[in-house]
Amino acid sequence: MEGLPTSYTLGPLPQISLFGLQIPTYHLIISLTCCLCVYWFYKRCEVRNLSQRNAMDISMIVLITGFVGARLAHVLWEYPSYYWQNPVEVFYFWQGGFVFYGGAILGYLCAFLYARRLKLTFWLWHDTAAPVLALGYALGRIACFLEGCCYGKVCTLPWAIPLKEVDVHSHAITTALRHPTQIYASLMEACTLFFLLWLEKKKAKLGVVFLSWVMLHALGRILMEIFRDDPRGPMLMGLSVSTMISLIFIGLAGMTLRARLREPH
């Protein structure tokens, strides 16, 4: 039976003390990020004369189904044998175990079905959401960095980050200098965010902002995956599943963007 990893890493700040309580930094930052993104999406919809009620509905759909999708992707892809033998632990989400693409795909599909049922303006809603998604991902990766998950390979670069690795059984601690892959991802996504806002300022054609985000995010994810060293489930042709999904997204978004740019205004 495939088990969970026999060790785990500790980031620079896995927990903070707040009013005498030890709160996981990851969960705190993710929660605050969700609140910030929902607020910004709401305000962006208000500026564009889009329904604020629909904005809140979409936000809740994405948050709930995204959470479920991220957890299921971890369970079904990364450690299916373990959770088959320990099904109740599927619900131990506070112990970690989420996959971004799982949440992104399920969250998008559910939001898409909702928007289609209400016949919402397709590309306008997508473009409105794109910078919000970029901000959320950039902040989320900072949470990963402080927690110590999604860590990089051992290296000797000047900016390498020392991470502690704790053995689950003996509790022995070793320290290694590693690529700060989470920071790489956060910085790339921040650059993507500024580029998207620049496209908006230039009055880009509807759909260009969202499709640009998909392509740039996927490219950044591929670059991040090159330097990652944490367990991510089975590999396909030597590539992680996230890399394979990113390549598919780049291809689909690229073809769609080309078609959009060829359409008359």
Image: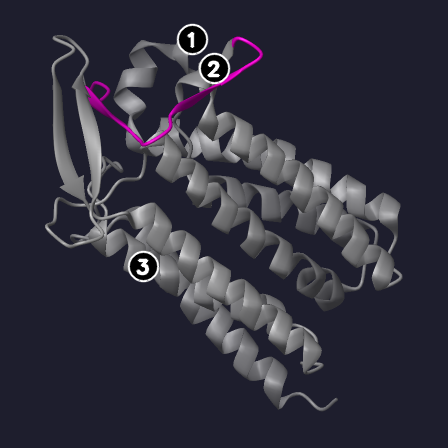
Q: Residues within 10 Å of mark 2 (few under 14, many from 20)?
A: few
Taking the spot 12% from the left edge, 49% from the top edge, the residue there is 155
Specify how the rendered protein is coloured. one colour
Q: Which mark is residue 222?
A: 3
Residue 56 sits in which quadrant? top right
- Which of 60/27 is in front? 27
Examine the rendered structure and indicate whether residue 160 appears above or below residue 22: below
Of the pair 203 and 85, the residue shown nearer to us = 203
237 is within the stretch colored magenta: no
**Please, what secondary structure does the residue beneath circle 1 have?**
helix
Q: Mark 1 or mark 3: which is in front?
A: 3
Asked whether the viewer can see residue 6, the reply is no
Q: Amino acid at mark 1?
A: Val
Locate residue 198 relative to residue 153 in the image: left or right: right
Q: Residues within 10 Å of mark 3 (few under 14, many from 20)?
A: many
Q: Position of residue 26 (x, y in %)?
A: 46, 29
Quadrant in the picture for the C terminus: bottom right
| Cβ–Cβ under 8 Å for marks 2 and 1 | yes
Residue type at tag 2: Phe
Q: Would you name the residue on which mark 2 appears?
A: 91
Magenta stretch?
2-20
* Residue 59 % position (x, y): 71, 42
Asked if the residue under mark 3 is in contact with the one under mark 2, i.e. CB atoms within 8 Å, the reply is no
Residue 204 pos. (x, y %): 67, 81
Q: Is residue 158 visible?
A: yes
Q: Amino acid at mark 3?
A: Ile
Residue 100 vertical position relative to residue 189 in the rendered view, above or below = above
Mark number displayed over residue 75: none
- Tell me: 209 left or right of 124: left
Residue, x 79% and y 47% (percent of image)?
A: 55
CA gap between label 2 and label 3 equals 30 Å
